[in-house]
Image (spheres, rainbow, N blue to C red):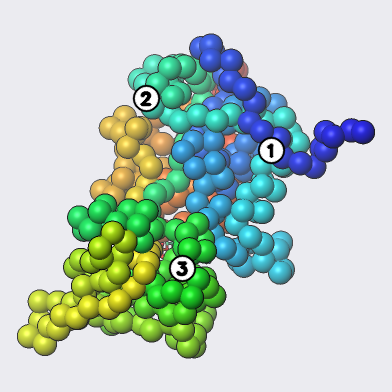
């Protein structure tokens, strides 16, 4: 029996550990990374892709993607990323486990250290390292980490079946998390610091119509309490105003959905970023301030941060990589 099903995504290849030089190195395995990988592989650039800290990227923790063209019935984030990986493997992309721990962009080829050991010299580099969830910065978030505090409802929501939880944030992520949790928990508080939601209209309507979700507008979280696990949150309504009001809610889980920080630290200060750390690219391209180094997806996108825009910029980065290599070969 042939157990080698070509449709099954295979494990990343074993990395020999020896230093090497590659034509095209891609860091990150979200929609930007895999799209760049498919395009560069089909252009015969033999890309090597390191999956990074979170193989598959942020979408692996998203419940349902309803707005990626071509999926009329929606698709789960996990299935979507597995499909992208399968597609990359079909074109023989060298997908490996590993995290970039250092980077020297001052040389050509540039030198990228993987897991503190191996150095890959890359003629071109496509950075698709995405972004990471933000926390409020309360000491209690660290105190109750893994004991009721989470930044991923899809990962941890299962533990809160028939319990009461709170989600912080007013954007699409917060609404999505609140709706997901409402399918499991008995009650969901959505804690919003302003007097309105920032989320898209359709998500707002879904949240406001859900009988299990109570939205607490103009409200900030100032602390959590509980013996060992989270048992409640200390909240303040109209903080700093004359009508300020302090109150507590009893909850079992506290979920953060207040945005993300771009994963660009390792590439700074060599690469130019904006004040929030998003890698700056030449408008309409994936070109950074260093020739041969490109950035795509959320790490370079403070505005849209969608799967489709990440995939689009991954494609742009790949085409520009090919053009860059052609130009230096014919110099
Ligand atoms: P956003 O930046 O859109 O929203 C962050 C939310 O968190 C805002 O409501 C913000 O409040 C709030 N916030 C930030 N800091 C704090 C804080 N310290 N205390 C309390 N609240 C805080 O991030 P999202 O992750 O929601 O979305 C990012 C992008 O991804 C958006 O473009 C969104 O449309 C998209 N997205 C799309 C989805 C989909 O289409 N299915 C799903 C998820 C995301 P304030 O409004 O006051 O600034």
**Residue at x 54%, y 41% (from the top left corner):** 55
Check the image and name the residue furthest to the front.
227
Q: Quadrant of ligand 1?
A: bottom left
Residue topped by disc 2? 102
Q: In this view, does 264 lie above or below 247?
A: above
Of 91 and 179, which appears nearest the observer?
179
Q: In which quarter of the image is residue 214?
A: bottom left
Is there any visible trace of residue 312 in the rendered image?
A: no
Q: Name the residue under label 1.
A: 88
In the rendered view, does 256 fall on the left or right side of 81? left
Identified at 25% across, 71% down, the residue is 233
| Picture quarter with the N terminus | top right
Neighbourhood count class around disc 1 (C-alpha, 10 Å): few under 14, some 14–19, many 20 upward: many
Mark 1 or mark 3: which comes first in sequence?
1
The reply to whether the residue tagged 2 has its Cβ within 8 angstroms of ligand 1 is: no
x%, y% of residue 188? 41, 77
Residue 226 makes an appearance in the image? yes
Distance from disc 3 to disc 2, alpha carbons, whole Å, reads 39 Å
* Circle nearer the viewer, 1 or 3: 3
Give the percent coordinates (x, y) of residue 105: 38, 23
Sequence order check, earlier mark of 1 and 2: 1
How far apart, in angstroms, are the residues tagged by discs 1 and 2?
A: 26 Å
Q: Is mark 1 within 8 Å of ligand 1?
A: no
Residue furthest right in the image: 1
Element assignment for label 2:
strand
> Which residue position is annotated with label 3?
160
**In percent of the image, x 37 and y 67: which residue is there?**
253
């Amino acid at each position: 029996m042939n157990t080698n099903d070509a449709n099954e995504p295979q494990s990343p290849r074993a990395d020999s550990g020896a230093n090497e030089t590659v034509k095209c190195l891609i860091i990150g395995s979200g929609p930007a990374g895999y799209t760049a990988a498919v395009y560069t592989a089909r252009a015969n650039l033999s890309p090597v892709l390191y999956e990074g800290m979170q193989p598959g990227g942020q979408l692996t923790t998203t419940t349902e993607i309803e707005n990626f063209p071509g999926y009329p019935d929606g698709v789960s984030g996990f299935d979507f990323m597995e499909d992208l990986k399968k597609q990359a493997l079909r074109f023989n992309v060298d997908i490996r486990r590993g995290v970039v721990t250092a980077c020297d962009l001052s040389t050509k080829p540039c030198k990228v250290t993987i897991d503190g050991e191996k150095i890959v010299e890359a003629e071109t580099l496509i950075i698709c390292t995405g972004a990471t969830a933000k926390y409020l910065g309360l000491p209690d978030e660290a105190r109750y980490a893994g004991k009721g505090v989470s930044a991923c409802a899809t990962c941890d929501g299962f533990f809160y079946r028939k319990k009461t939880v709170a989600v912080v944030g007013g954007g699409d992520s917060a609404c999505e998390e609140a709706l997901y949790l409402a399918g499991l928990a008995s009650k969901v508080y959505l804690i919003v610091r302003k007097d309105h939601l920032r989320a898209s209209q359709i998500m707002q309507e879904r949240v406001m119509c859900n009988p299990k979700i109570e939205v607490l507008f103009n409200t900030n979280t100032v602390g959590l309490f509980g013996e060992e696990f989270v048992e409640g949150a200390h909240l303040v309504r109209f903080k700093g105003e004359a009508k300020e009001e302090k109150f507590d809610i009893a909850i079992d889980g506290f979920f953060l959905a207040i945005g993300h920080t771009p994963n660009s630290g390792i590439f700074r200060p060599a690469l130019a970023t904006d004040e929030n750390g998003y890698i700056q690219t030449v408008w309409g391209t994936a070109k950074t301030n260093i020739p041969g180094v490109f950035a795509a997806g959320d790490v370079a996108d403070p505005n849209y941060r969608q799967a489709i825009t990440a995939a689009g910029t991954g494609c742009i980065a790949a085409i520009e990589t090919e053009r860059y290599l052609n130009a230096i070969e014919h110099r």
